[in-house]
Image: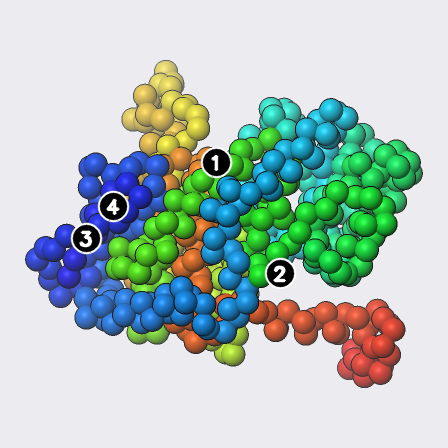
Amino acid sequence: MRKLIFTGLCLLAVSCSHTDDYDGNEINDNIDTTMLKLNLKGCDTFVKNADYRKYVEKAYKAFDTLDKENGEGNDFLGWKHLPSETLKGTIVKECREVCDRWQAKKVDLVVAIGIGGSYLGAKCAIEALSHTFDATLHTGKGAQVVFAGNNLGEDYLCELIDLMKTKNVACIVISKSGTTTEPAVAFRIVKQFIEEKYGKKEASERIVAITDKSRGALKSLATGEGYKTFVIPDNVGGRFSVLTPVGLLPIMAAGFDVEKMLQGAKKMEDVCGVCCEENPAIQYAAMRNLLHMENGKTVEVLINFIPKLQYFAEWWKQLYGESEGKGGKGIFPASCCFTTDLHSMGQYIQDGNRILFETLVSVDNPAHSLKIEADEQNLDGLNYLAGKSVDYCNHMAQLGTQLAHIDGGVPQLEVNVAKLDEDALGQLFYFFEYACGISAYMLGVNPFNQPGVEAYKKNMFALLAKPGYEEAGEALRKRL
């Protein structure tokens, strides 16, 4: 067996002696510290070397299908080269022109309307990069970006109107068709508000549509009203769209460096596109499928010890849930934020049904430093921590949790980045996307469709008495 040494943009392997159990990763002291790292050592007591080798071979075959673009869903592979192609193109420049125009108008609130992949990527990036209390402190360089069209909550939309009344508003509406119910309802309401507040002519300067290149209700409206438009590429599905204008424009509007994010993703495009065992996407796909198929692990819990990564987990859950959950197959994606959820879900993870494994997204260096001071009374008994940083305590909690969960029968994978910035997020986005394609092909499913999503829509349309659904609606009402 080979141990893995990460160095620069390449992942190199060296031979070494090895026991019968899988040995995980060793990290060289000379690595590029800005590069994402994958550590599988937390699986070494659960997995045999021979089994891991078998699943690496399966991952190679799935990689080949993805690389040669000859598998199911091969018309939705435009995301594979988005980082390199977007860096060469004009999209970043066009996004900047929109943001500059809005900044000149002193826009301080951007309502981004979309659902699923049309909002989760931008939401998770903005949450990860923003000051936690930016909505109150206004520390950001850009506008406040809020999201709508991802639910049908009447209170939510009414309270959004309350917020818009106090702000200088612009809107990004994201929909391939323009007829998806949740974003269409939200956009009708937000569009009306903007037109009434600023007038139709000015509204056309404050609304940007990200939609189909040539057809659909939203495209027709945008053309008629003179909105600036960006294209959702035909060959990029929603859950893989964060590095298109779908994610880039809201993230830039919030004041963050999308070019740096694309450069981080380009690093992973270079690494993940090589068919070798040192490819972290191959390693991750191989190990998670091995744990699933041979060890009976049916649930993967994405965990973190950084509160700002909560919505990254939501993005990841959609990516893997929609890509793999088909035909009675798939690993169920769940998430927990530690140490918070150690005081709720921790009991089950430690001591419940042994059906799960964990993937930890860890961050080496926080953006701030805060030390615990000594207290003369020491009533809380914490003086033994005097002089230690809060992050040091958090890291010890992380290590203690990892060891406890492994001892409790929970295998651990760890994806590590140096710090939580645009470069790291770009790497994380692309790494998990590429690994998802490999993993789903290993499971024998099409990674790029979502037939199950349509079932609730058909029932909803029928119950709402949408024209053409009358008969179905009558049948459903008899069941209620």
Inspect the image, locate mark 4, and give the three-letter code of the amino acid beneath it. Phe
Of the numbered discs 3 and 4, the one sitting upstream in the chain is 4
Residue at image coords 68%, 47%: 230
Q: Quadrant of the C terminus?
A: bottom right
Q: Which callout, 1 or 2, points to the residue nearer the camera?
A: 2
Quickly name the residue at label 2.
234
Residue at image coords 56%, 33%: 256
With respect to residue 391, does 275 lie above or below? Answer: below
Q: Secondary structure at mark 1?
A: helix
Inspect the image, locate mark 2, and give the three-letter code of the amino acid beneath it. Asp
Q: Are marks 1 and 2 in contact (CB under 8 Å)?
A: no
**How far apart are the alpha carbons under marks 3 and 2?**
38 Å
Of the numbered discs 4 and 2, the one sitting upstream in the chain is 4
Q: Secondary structure at mark 3?
A: strand
Q: Nearer the viewer, residue 272 or 87?
A: 87
Quickly name the residue at label 1.
260
Q: Are marks 3 and 4 in contact (CB under 8 Å)?
A: no
Inspect the image, locate mark 3, and give the three-letter code of the amino acid beneath it. Ala
Residue 311: x %, y % from top left: 54, 47
Quickly name the residue at label 4.
6
Residue 403: x %, y % from top left: 27, 50
